[in-house]
Image: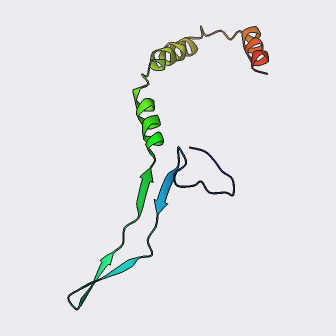
Amino acid sequence: MKIYGNKPPTPNEPGSVTVQKSSGVKNKVSSGNVEETAAKDRVEISGKMKELMALINQIPEVRKEKLEEIKKSIESGNYKIDSLKIAEKILREI
């Protein structure tokens, strides 16, 4: 999904979500009788967005084990932070 600022995305753009909002009550005329039916809002997700959602759902949650390991290390007081490694990684990203 993209963020477009003040310009809304076009409905057929990849990753776009189309929302149709109705004005409320629709009148249905059949053989002289008027029926009022409640209008419904509708959301359509593009095919590309559906593909991305399917890929996201396939990502395994392998990080839980690592997180638990770090959590236990912190609680036991054995977790060591290597500030030099952190600084090196930050500088590589710049």
Residue 57 falls left or right of residue 9: left
Task: Give the residue at the far bottom of this rendering.
Answer: 32
- Residue at 41% of width from left, 65% of height from top? 41
| Residue 12 position within the rendered picture, expressed as x and y whole percent measured from the top left | 52, 51
Task: Give the residue at the far left of this rendering.
Answer: 31
- Residue at 46% of width from left, 47% of height from top? 46
Give 68 or 22, whichever is nearer the viewer: 22
Give 68 or 10, whichever is nearer the viewer: 10
Q: Quick check: 57 above or below 26?
A: above
Q: Quadrant of residue 51?
A: top left
Q: How is the image coloured?
A: rainbow
Give 30 or 92, whichever is nearer the viewer: 30
| Residue 25 position within the rendered picture, expressed as x and y whole percent measured from the top left | 37, 79
Residue 38 falls left or right of residue 66: left
Give 36 or 85, whichever is nearer the viewer: 36
Q: Quick check: 41 above or below 88?
A: below
- Residue at 76% of width from left, 18% of height from top? 90
- Residue at 56% of width from left, 43% of height from top? 1
**Could you tell me how many numbered marks the image carries?**
0
The quadrant of the rendering that contains the C terminus is: top right
Residue 17 falls left or right of residue 84: left
Q: Quick check: 41 above or below 79?
A: below
| Residue 85 position within the rendered picture, expressed as x and y whole percent measured from the top left | 72, 9
